[in-house]
Amino acid sequence: MQPSRFLLCIIIVSSIALLSSYVFLLQSSIGPLLPGSVIGVVLVNKTSVYLRSNSVYTYRDNELPPHLPWAFSTNSRKPKSSPKVNIDLGSSSKKETGLSGLETKKTCDQNQAKLRIFMYDLPTEFHFGLLGWKGKLGQIWPDVSNPNNIPSYPGGLNLQHSMEYWLTLDLLSSNNPGVGRPCNAIRVQNASQADIIFVPFFSSLSYNRYSKLHGKEKISMDKMLQNKLLEFLMSRDEWKRSGGKDHLIVAHHPNSMLDARRKLGSAMFVLADFGRYPVQIANLNKDIIAPYKHVVRVGSNYVPFEERPILMYFQGAIYRKDGGVIRQQLYHLLKDEKDVHFTYGSLHANGISKAGQGMVSSKFCLNIAGDTPSSNRLFDAIASHCVPVIISDDIELPFEDVLDYSEFSIFVQESDALKKGFLLKLLGGIKRDKWTKMWENLKEVEHHFEYGYPSQPGDAVEMIWEAVSRKMSSIQLRLHRQKRFRRFQLIGKSM
């Protein structure tokens, strides 16, 4: 071999070796295209969750997992800024909900939180004790870092008024670095540092389970707890300081807190509606309307227009009191119409499951006033992606100051709905394109009505805290007006 050719071979081999070493070093420093920190977890309910550093992604069956941080996709729709994970301790088994703590974050920074909340350490009989939970000696709260230690909320229709449960869990976890959650609201240990004071009484559960007399009881357990709560609050310096105006009380069931509500009317309530409250006790100026927790369990609800053969759907109690009389009138107008499902329904014989299937098979779902203006049916419809038709003149809707319900719901005045043929003509005239647009809008907002633990960005828990935050200026106004003459009155009395 000639020397020049031999030298050329050496140069080529050396160059290849050098290039290979460079590529190897580069790969070692930047890692593979799909990082090892991406972990796939497949749940029993066939929902897959991918955890990547501090982000959580979910995708349903037949969807591709994301391979890049920005690649969250649901049926080719544009990515949401806050993808959610449904972790539902109320309606799922603990095996299905054992994801708490998988996403680890730093403790929420008190200085960054929009809302600082002081929560009373009420005895367990007011909250988790109502679920049968018993802690160790001196233990008031369950360990929320482990879902196996958190008592489940009872299912069925109890769940629809379970807001107090989710809000309490969220506050308990707000300073736990093992639970990933939004940091907009955090619990503080000193009431003087708080924007709002939270009263952790499970009032709806107390009414649902303990409002009836048993045996030789002369006073129900629910009424006894309300009396004890009144005694506790009225003795507290925090209540006396503000007259209760900076206190937050959840009374979502329309019949909860019946005995105590008048004496607590200065506080901010979290309610389903104002149907059974005088305006002096509850009103939009100070109170929060929160969504019911939907009770239908929906599998694949991405069902398009053509695959929903039922035009109009209603299933539930038909004979109601007060404003709910309209249900009976509409029943007689619609029960025999083609493509309309309007029938009585209950919990028995898999009623909830059948209702879910019916809603997924329907284009429009009727939300009609019952004993009070609101109904869980609206939120079952949203979960089913069935365009809601709201027939309730006095209804107040959750988060309506930031959500435009007309983009994904149809409103019909009660007087119009009772006109023969009106609903059929109105809904039958809505064509595929217009319905699909509302359906797409519905899918974009559905996460705002989902409760779960841990809370997720933009879910119902965070939306409630945001709504409370928006009321803070109103609270401050009330407190400042209350102080107008107090200081000088005190000086005058001392002279």
Image (spheres, rainbow, N blue to C red):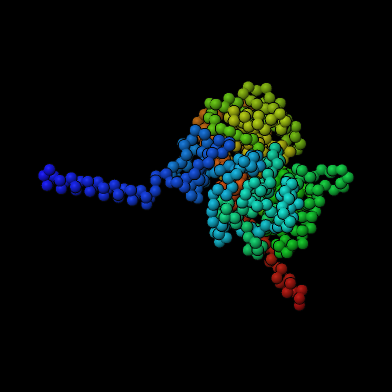
Residue depicted at x 68% and y 48%: 164
Image height of 66 relative to 145, above or below: above
Image height of 115 relative to 56, above or below: below
Q: How many marks?
A: 0
Residue depicted at x 62% and y 49%: 146
Q: Single out the residue that lies furthest toward the front.
A: 1
- Residue 55: image x %, image y %? 50, 48
Q: Which residue is nearer to you in this view: 340 or 101?
A: 101
Location of the N terminus (image quadrant): top left
Q: Is residue 449 visible?
A: no
Location of the C terminus (image quadrant): bottom right
Residue depicted at x 49% and y 44%: 39
Residue depicted at x 74% and y 62%: 236
- Residue 485: image x %, image y %? 70, 68
Q: Which residue is nearer to you in this view: 258 or 118?
A: 118
- Residue 370: image x %, image y %? 71, 37
- Residue 259: image x %, image y %? 79, 50
Q: Which residue is nearer to you in this view: 181 or 236?
A: 181
Left or right for 278, reference 1: right
Q: Which residue is nearer to you in this view: 162 or 470?
A: 162
Image height of 134 relative to 310, above or below: below
Q: Single out the residue that lies furthest toward the right.
A: 216
Left or right for 98, reference 489: left
Q: Is residue 216 visible?
A: yes
State which quadrant residue 350 falls in.
top right
